[in-house]
Image (spheres, rainbow, N blue to C red):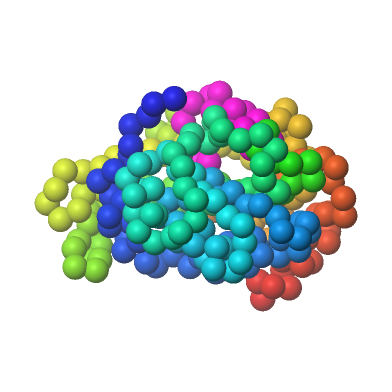
Amino acid sequence: MAREDTFSALARYYDALMSHVDYTRWETIATELTTHLPRGFRHLDAACGTARFLDGCLRAGWDSSGVDLSIGMLHAARLRTAAPLAAADLRALPFREGFDFITCLFDSVNFILDDEGIPEAMAAFATALRPGGVLYFDIVTERMVTEYFEGPAWTEDNEGFHTTWKTDYDRATNIAETRVRVNHGEASTIRERIYPREAIEDALAAAGLRLIICADAETWNPPRRNTIRLDFVACKPPIGKLTAKRLTAQIKERLR
């Protein structure tokens, strides 16, 4: 499935653009989830980007690999990490029961824009997981777009360069289109689609994955109208002892 490399022009700047992002929460939750996995588990970071999260997993001693659709992002990732990397579409992962743990973070699932894409991605995750394997991913909600991005253009000063951002949100298609211009160069266009929670849960069920929990990513309480990011944890049967109640208590204790 050939696709335009949306991040080709931004990859070299990406880490500086995202320097304000705190990866600690993702790292904490992922680490807690590994306590439910077998010793020597294999991990795949899907849509790994520049490998900022992936490299931390590797340094923690995990058997981790990464895939991303963007060749530009993979090039930046190879400058950072020794983890095995490959180009792959979330909707067509080239793996069969190869991993005990899959992460797909930083709203990477929102970059799937077509109606069939979410069911295809969840089916691909299910195929790539071993029985008992765990999937952890997140999505942003419409509240995130309308409260923090939609509206007038804004400019940011970064490490040695500046960027101009402008986001428009089409409520008919639920697609947010963000144009990012570095200095005076040509603008790059990033598109994300907002999905209702029910669409994700239906796709998980159709793929044979059991949803363990859907939580507000910031609090790990049940989602509310003002939730801006949702965390999903699902398991490929058999489920074992991983339950929503147990996992929620475990994660909330660590996020304090």
Picture layout, residue 256 above or below residue 120: below
Residue at 54% from the left image edge and 45% from the top image edge: 46
Q: Residue furthest left?
A: 184
Task: Judge left or right: residue 251 versus residue 43.
Answer: right
Q: Is residue 79 above or below residue 151?
A: below
- Looking at the image, residue 246 sits to the left or right of residue 143; the answer is right
Q: Nearer the viewer, residue 26 or 51?
A: 51
Whole-percent x, y for residue 20 in the image: 39, 67
Pick whichever, 244 or 16, lies toward us: 16
Q: Residue at x 35, y 59 (%)?
A: 79
Name which quarter of the figure residue 200 lies in.
top right
Give x and y (percent) for residue 141. Answer: 54, 46
Q: Could you tell me what secondary structure mostly forms the magenta stretch?
A: helix
From this viewpoint, is residue 109 visible? Answer: yes
Number of numbered labels in the structure image: 0
**Percent of width and height locating residue 72:** 32, 45
Q: Which residue occupies the extreme right position in the image?
A: 241
Q: Quadrant of the N terminus?
A: top left
At 50% from the left edge and 51% from the top edge, which residue is drawn?
A: 84
Magenta stretch: includes residue 199 = no
Give, as a single range, the part of the protein colored magenta: 107-126
Image quarter (top left, top right, bottom left or bottom right) of the C terminus? bottom right
Is residue 39 shown left or right of residue 159? Answer: right
Q: Nearer the viewer, residue 183 or 146?
A: 183
Rendered residue at 49%/26% (across/down): 114
Q: Nearer the viewer, residue 116 or 149?
A: 116
Q: Is residue 226 visible?
A: no
